[in-house]
Amino acid sequence: MIKDTAARKTIIDIGLRMYTRGFVAATDGNISVRLNKNCLLTTPSGISKGTLHEDDLIVMDFSGKVISGYRKPSSEYRLHTAIYEARPDVNAVIHAHPPLCTALTVAGISLDQPILPEVVLTLGSIPTAPYATPTTEEVPDSIKQLIPHHDAILLERHGTVTVGECCESAYNKLEKLEHTAQVMLYSLQLGSAKPLSSKQISELIKLRDLYAGK
Ligand SMILES: [Zn+2]
C-alpha cells in the first residue's frame, strides 16, 4: 500500500515536470497512483499540472466514486481505472499530450518500428491506439487490446498513455516516448528512419529477456 501523503507529493512533482517539459498544455493530461486495492489518487479536472497543490488531488474508488477531495475528477478517469483493472502490476498511470508523439499520429507515422536499441530494451514496441473521442468510453476501449502487452501507447490525434510500477517509472516512459518521437522526426527530416535489422532486434530481445530473468 502506498502512503497517501507520499503519493500526493510524487504526483505534484511529476505534474510539474510534465508541464515544464511541455508534455501537457493548459489543463491537459492526468496522473494517477493506485493507493491500495480499493482506491486511487488522481489529478482533478481543469487544473494545470504545473500548479497542483496536495489538496487538489482526489481519492476515488475503481468505479469512479469520489471518496475524498473537493474538486471534480478528470473526465478521462475511466482510462485510468480500466488500466488498473487490466494490469495488477501497474501502480501509476500518466496520460499526456506531448506534441511530437501527437504530431506523428496526426501525420500517420507509427513509432512501432524499432529504430533505437535502448527503446527496444526498455519500452519494446510502441503501438498507436485508433482514434477515439476524448472523454468518452471509446478512449479506454481503444487501448483494451494493447494495454496487457504495452507500457507506452500513442493515442491517435490525442496523446500518450504510459504506465509503471510507480509514478517515476510511468513518467520516465513518457519522457522516453517523446524523445523517441523527436529522434524519429529528425531522422525523417534528414532523409529516412532506417529500422534496426532483424538480427539486431533478436540480439536485443535476448538481452531484454536476460535482464528480466526469463
Ligand atoms: Zn487527453
Image (spheres, rainbow, N blue to C red):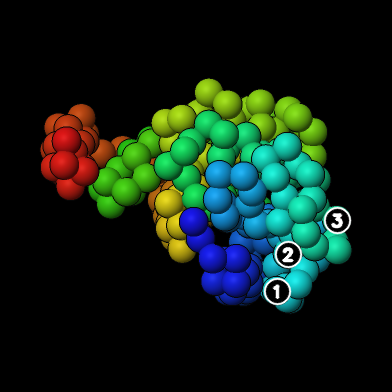
Give the answer, above or below, for where 89 lies relative to 167. above
- Say which residue label 3 marks: 72
Q: Is residue 195 left or right of residue 97?
A: left
Q: Is residue 114 left or right of residue 13?
A: left
- The amino acid at mark 3 is Lys
Q: Position of residue 74 (x, y in %)?
A: 78, 51
Residue at image x 79%, y 33%?
Answer: 136
Mark 2, Cα crowd under 10 Å, few <14 / some 14-19 / many 20+, is many
116, 187: nearer the viewer = 116
**Mark 2 and mark 1 residues within 8 Å of each other at the beta carbon:** yes
- The amino acid at mark 2 is Leu
Q: Is residue 147 left or right of residue 130?
A: left
Judged from the image, the secondary structure of the residue bearing numbered disc 1 is helix
Report, in whole angstroms, how far the alpha carbon at label 2 lies from the one at label 1.
6 Å
Residue at image x 73%, y 28%?
Answer: 138
Residue at image x 18%, y 47%?
Answer: 211
Image quarter hosting the C terminus: top left
Judged from the image, the secondary structure of the residue bearing numbered disc 2 is loop
Q: Position of residue 29 (x, y in %)?
A: 69, 55
- Say which residue label 1 marks: 54
- Say which residue label 2 marks: 57
Give the answer, above or below, for where 7 lies relative to 105. below
Mark 3, Cα crowd under 10 Å, few <14 / some 14-19 / many 20+, is some
**Mark 3 and mark 2 residues within 8 Å of each other at the beta carbon:** no
> Which comes sooner in the sequence, label 3 or label 2?
2
Report, in whole angstroms, how far the alpha carbon at label 1 lies from the one at label 3.
14 Å
